Each structure stands twice: as structure tokens, then as C-alpha cells.
Amino acid sequence: MVISHILGGIGNQMFQYAAGRALSHSNGQRFLLDLSDFSNYRLHHGFELSRVFNVNAEIASPATLHEMLGWRANRWSKRMLRRPQLAWFRGKRFKVEPHFNYWHDFNKLKDDCYLYGYWQSEQYFNQYESLIRQDFTFREQLGGRNAELALEMANTQSVSLHVRRGDYVSNPKNRNVLEVCSLDYYRKAIAYVAERVERLVFYVFSDDMAWVKQNLPVGFPCVYVEHNRQQESYRDMQLMSLCRHHVIANSSFSWWGAWLNANPDKLVIAPQSWFRSGNNDCDLIPGDWVRL
């Protein structure tokens, strides 16, 4: 049995799910999700995977969690056990991501285990790419304005451009961990794509579109996508995935928007600096993407 601890926004949930799904499939094990930490979670939009994607996830019950972890199953214990100095108390089944870059012993896990971490690297699941892509197909087709945009994207050299600000700017904790991509990064990324793609059209996505319009002149035909809000905000990821090329932010949301585009000829531009906290992000960006 493999149980993945799930928490965070939809992009983080996808990484956590994909790592556990790949490991359980590799070992022929039952796969479950621990959603217990969502009970008092007020950020983002709660657990979204089953609502957004064709994911038929089995949810771990309190009894199953207790069977797997014993006293470690309660919320306080899990949070404490992620600390390196308490690793001795985790037991054999509680597996905490030891560092942010890819953990090479991950695929050596063969027994029952509980996965706690972010697991933000394609290397955790790239052997089962087709399986993960199948799970992450969107449940609902696009309609209305989104359907119109999808048709435009299919008939142009469309480039998604994502500017993430929001809680990266307003939340003091996030400000200490995550960079805010600079205007210079976006200028370089736009120029890089423009040198290689003719007649391109940028589709701009952001949680602070007013700031983008005021501060980031694109210099090419562009469409500002700003109507997908609240529970429908995942539609931006769906639209991103339909673009031919991508300029992503240091955000798991646009990372997945680019990854879900299966076109082997896509250009994906990612920021050179993802964290300001010193996390090693060398395995975060797939090898065929370009960092600027």
C-alpha cells in the first residue's frame, strides 16, 4: 500500500499524486490519498484533483491511516516528524522527502509506505508518463469564451505566459521562500521565443492582471485571459496546456500547464531562479526546457 499526503494548491497536489501513483503502479500496490489536512485548510480551493481530472482516487480512512502509521497518523505528529532531527521516530513506513531535488532511493521503496513531501520532479513519474497523462485529462470540456480561446490557440503560434504574484507578494512566509519572477526574465523569455517562432500570439495568465498590463509590455499580439476565477481558475491551466509554447512562472500551476502539452516540439521557458530560500531545484525543470 502507498499513501500520498496531499495538501496545497492544485499544482502541488498533482506532484504529490503523480509520485505516489507511479510508485504504487511500479510495485503493484494499492494507492490511496490522505486528505485529512484539508479539514481546516483555507488556502486555494481545497482538494481539486477528483473534481478537475479523470482521477478516481481512493481516500485513506482514519482507520487505514492508523493501521499504516499508528500514533504517527495524527496531524500534529505528521507535522513534527517532517523535521530532520526527529527522523529517528518516523519508523519504517513514514517517508519524508529528504531534500527538494530528486531522491534517488525513491524507487527502492517496495514495502508499505506513507509519502510526505512535495516530490516536485518529473523524475518521480516519467517512467509512467502515459499513465499520469491519462489520469490528468480534464473531466469537463471547455465551453463559452474558453472554447473560443482554445480554437484560437490551435490555429496560431500560441504561447502561454504566466505571471504569478498574489500570495508570492502578499504572504510573508512565501516571500521568504519563493522568488517573484522579474520583468527582465519575462523580457528575455519573450525575446527568446520570438527569435525562434514566427507570427506568435501570447496568451497571458496572471493572478494580478492589472499589474501585468501596467508593467509588462509584451510587444507582440496578446490576449489577456482573466475571466476564470475561484472554482473555475483551473481552466487557466487547461488553456495553457493547449498552447504550442510556454513561458512559465516559478509556479507548479504553470509548470503543469506546460507539461500537460504533449507536443514534442514545444518551447518551454522557465526562470533560472525558483527559490530564494536556497532549495536545490536542479531536478525541478525537465531537461528539454530552457532556463533563463
Image (cartoon, rainbow, N blue to C red):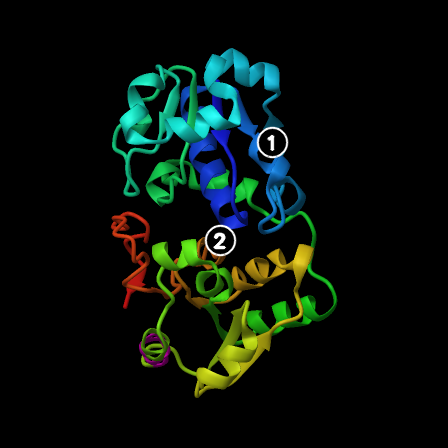
Q: Residues within 10 Å of mark 2 (few under 14, many from 20)?
A: some
Q: Quadrant of residue 48?
A: top right
Q: Position of residue 227 (x, y in %)?
A: 67, 70
State the count of labels: 2
| Camera-nearest residue between 240 and 266 | 240
| Front label number (2 vs 1) | 1
Q: Which mark is residue 260?
A: 2
Residue 55 shows up from this direction:
no
Q: Position of residue 250 (x, y in %)?
A: 39, 60
Q: How far is the residue under mark 2 from the one under mark 1?
A: 19 Å
Q: Position of residue 269 (x, y in %)?
A: 35, 66
Q: Which residues are magenta?
A: 188-194
- Our reading of the magenta stretch's main secondary structure is helix
Q: Which circle's residue, 2 or 1, is located before the other in the chain?
A: 1
Q: Which mark is residue 173?
A: none
Confirm or deny contact between disc 2 and disc 1 (CB under 8 A).
no
Location of the C terminus by quadrant is: bottom left
Q: Is label 1 in a helix, a strand or a loop? A: loop
Residue type, label 1:
Ala
Residue at 67% x, 47% y is 139
| Camera-nearest residue between 3 and 152 | 3
Q: Position of residue 243 (x, y in %)?
A: 51, 66
Relative to residue 133, is residue 105 drawn left or right? left
Q: Is label 2 in a helix, a strand or a loop? A: loop
Residue at 47% x, 41% y is 130
Q: Residues within 10 Å of mark 1 (few under 14, many from 20)?
A: some
Q: Quadrant of residue 50?
A: top right
Residue type, label 2:
Leu
Residue 6 in the magenta stretch? The answer is: no
Q: Which residue is mark 1?
A: 57
Residue at 62% x, 72% y is 226
Residue at 29% x, 33% y is 98
